[in-house]
Image (cartoon, rainbow, N blue to C red):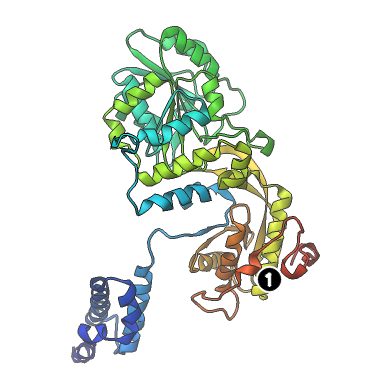
Amino acid sequence: MGDKQVLLRGLPKVDEVLQDERLVLFYETMPRPLIVDTVREAVGDVRNGILEGTVDRGLSQDEIMDRITGILSEKKKRTMRRVLNATGVVLHTNLGRARLSSNASGAVWEIMDAYCTLEYDLKSGTRGSRHAIVEGIIKKVTGAEAAMAVNNNAAATMLALAALARGKEVVVSRGELVEVGGSFRIPDVMSESGAFLKEVGTTNKTRISDYRSAYKEGVTGCFMKVHTSNYRIVGFTEDVKLEQMAQLGRELGLPVIYDMGNGLMADLKRYGLDEPTVTDALKSGADVVLFSGDKLLGGPQAGILIGKKEYIDKMKEHPLARAFRVDKMTLAALEATFLQYIDQEAALKEIPVLKMICASPLELKERAEMLGVMLKAACPDLRVQVESCRDQVGGGSAPTCELEGYGVAVWKEGLSAQRMERKLRKAPVPLIVRVNHDRVLVDVRTLADEEFPLAVEAFLSVAEGAPADGTGTLSHEAGTLSHEAGTLPHGAEIFPHMKGGEI
């Protein structure tokens, strides 16, 4: 007990620690109460350790300060941080799905710290409607009679069902009762909307006669078709085309809702992506089409509803419309994204999601070789090799589509791929990679050219003799690549660096 008392008396006072010059930089960037709490917690932890017997020696103020500055450095980092996506999954749900285009992010930047015309009509000087911000451009791009946006596609589904089928049956094929991420199921959404599920058909086969047989006058509220965007049923199958369902809906006077999820606006079949487009859905006769903003559309998180004006107007007037409404930043990004679709060929080059999907294998190989050379130059102790790989669209879209890609396989003698991967996640800008055959793979499809230097910096923390905090620097000029010339800066050729596959 006497020893514990000696150790306790040796602990620095909180007020003394707060005067330590090593905290000066933290005072400039962090609230003082947070620093005070951290110091108290750190000193308190040491005190508890002494009392519990887990700390059996005196700690100097320097040792305690090391603990405190380490904790403060971690607290200084925001929970949501920028990362580098080198997984090859274009719509990585865990990493934020679609990257915004520069046009969209610029639109958000312009209004996010300013007043704006969110619900103000400049022409009349009176209150306006936030629906009007995006409705016009969505109608122009899609050809729909009316449109609106809510905060995500699950909300769009619930709003459509609540407005059009509350208290009535909604007929859905059993094979389309999907579950999306987070155990979120279509039947559950339907139940919460106040509509009643009426399953028809079987898991693998549903016919138009099933829908007709399920119809009951005054009982059936609508027909609903759900695009199975995150899985496929193959083999002995049969499903009802949207055109058939729409025709039956018109015959019976019922609205047909199509939840297509992915929101593809451009035909990408020539790039290997065989997914239905929003305009195809409208041309097929769907009365209401629902889709996500942050999937293949390439915009912000949102649920977009388009279709017949009489149905969209009912949704605008429903109480849930206010509960599900989107903010000014989402609307700004959404408007800017749809504006880019006025010129679809330009959209393929300017919207990051589309640009990544449409990238050719040759382009990806050249970029992988470029990154490989940069890595080898900065980290000579690393083994580097350009390899072909298979990429994914992700985000619950195109589950059977694999994209031909290229990446840089990196390994180091005496260091497991798992440990390297952990180190890369701890970089100043974390690099998220794939692990395969005791190598990490940096897939360049989802890594922009301007991010190459940051990726190299992440590897500096792995390289022998690099600073533990990964603060090594790399000139951003080294990350420039001329695809036309196929050369590195200063005229160094790309391809001659390849010897037996390894750089």
The residue at which mark 1 appears reads as 376
Q: Position of residue 4 (x, y in %)?
A: 21, 88
Q: Inspect this view and state whether residue 61 appears.
A: yes
Q: Is residue 9 left or right of residue 420?
A: left
Q: Position of residue 216 (x, y in %)?
A: 37, 9
Q: Is residue 390 left or right of residue 146?
A: right
Q: Is residue 33 above or below residue 158?
A: below
Q: In the picture, which quadrant includes the N terminus?
A: bottom left
Mark 1 Cα-neighbour bin, 10 Å: few <14, some 14–19, many ≥20: some
User: Observer-nearest residue: 253 or 435?
Assistant: 253
* Residue at image coords 34%, 29%: 159
Q: Inspect this view and state whether residue 294 appears.
A: no
User: Observer-nearest residue: 452 or 12?
Assistant: 452
Q: Position of residue 168 (x, y in %)?
A: 32, 17
Q: Is residue 501 left or right of residue 181?
A: right
* Residue at image coords 64%, 71%: 412
Could you say whether the residue bearing mark 1 is in a helix, strand or loop? helix
Q: Is residue 84 above or below residue 304?
A: below
Q: Position of residue 192 (x, y in %)?
A: 30, 30
